[in-house]
Amino acid sequence: MEEKERKDGYSTIRVPQQFAIEIDKLIGAHGFTSRAEIVKEAVRQYLQKYEDPHLSIINHDNNETKIRDTKLNQITTINITTKGNYCPACDASNCEHIRFALMQSDIIKTTKKEKKFESK
């Protein structure tokens, strides 16, 4: 579906009428004064639940992964090896940066290849 870009920085999104009826029931409750406020809050919560927007992978090789952390406003280089993991930003072997990196499919593949190579 193609959206026209508006000059005010907003997009119009259509929802089924039944959603609009349910949204309208919340207006005046919990401090909401409009449909837009309710939808923005719902989308914000959805994105926070399914994404971790403050962490992103910059690049990685066999042993090092560079992660941008916008909460800390820094880039950290973590080490993920078959012998152990280390994050200098947290001075830890298990932290949110390492867990985030280990959830990335390309990093998992690289680590598995390294384990196979070491076992030969």
Image (cartoon, rainbow, N blue to C red):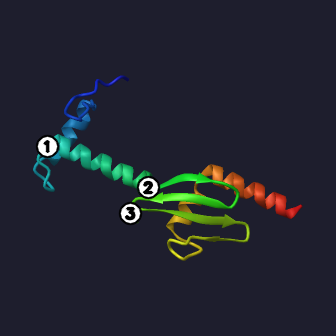
What residue appears at the point 78 percent right and 61 percent down from the top-left corner? 115
Q: Are marks 2 and 1 in contact (CB under 8 Å)?
A: no
Read off the residue under disc 2. 52
Which sits in the foreground, 16 or 66? 66
Closest to the observer: 82 or 91?
A: 91
Q: Which residue is mark 1?
A: 34
Measure how far apart labels 2 and 3 are at the Cα level: 11 Å
The part of the image, by quadrant, that contains residue 34 is top left
Q: Quadrant of the C terminus?
A: bottom right
Q: Say what secondary structure mark 2 lies in.
A: loop
Q: Position of residue 37 (x, y in %)?
A: 19, 46
Instruction: Tell me where residue 96 appears, x and y as whole percent.
Output: 50, 66
Secondary-structure class at tag 1:
loop
Q: In this rendering, would 91 be left or right of 111?
A: left
Label 2 vs 1, first from the N-terminus: 1
Dot 1 or dot 3: first in sequence order is: 1
Horizontal and vertical percent position of residue 97: 52, 64
Hey, what amino acid is under mark 3? Answer: Lys
Secondary structure at badge 3 equals loop
Residue type at numbered disc 2: Asp
Query: Which residue, given by chain and number where applicable, does mark 3 sit on?
Result: 71
Q: Residue furthest right?
A: 120
47 relative position to 117: left or right: left
Mark 2 → mark 1, Cα distance in angstroms = 27 Å
- For mark 3, does the 10 Å Cα neighbourhood hold few (<14), some (14 to 19), or many (20 or more) residues? few
| Circle 1/circle 3 CB separation < 8 Å | no
Rendered-image quadrant of the N terminus: top left
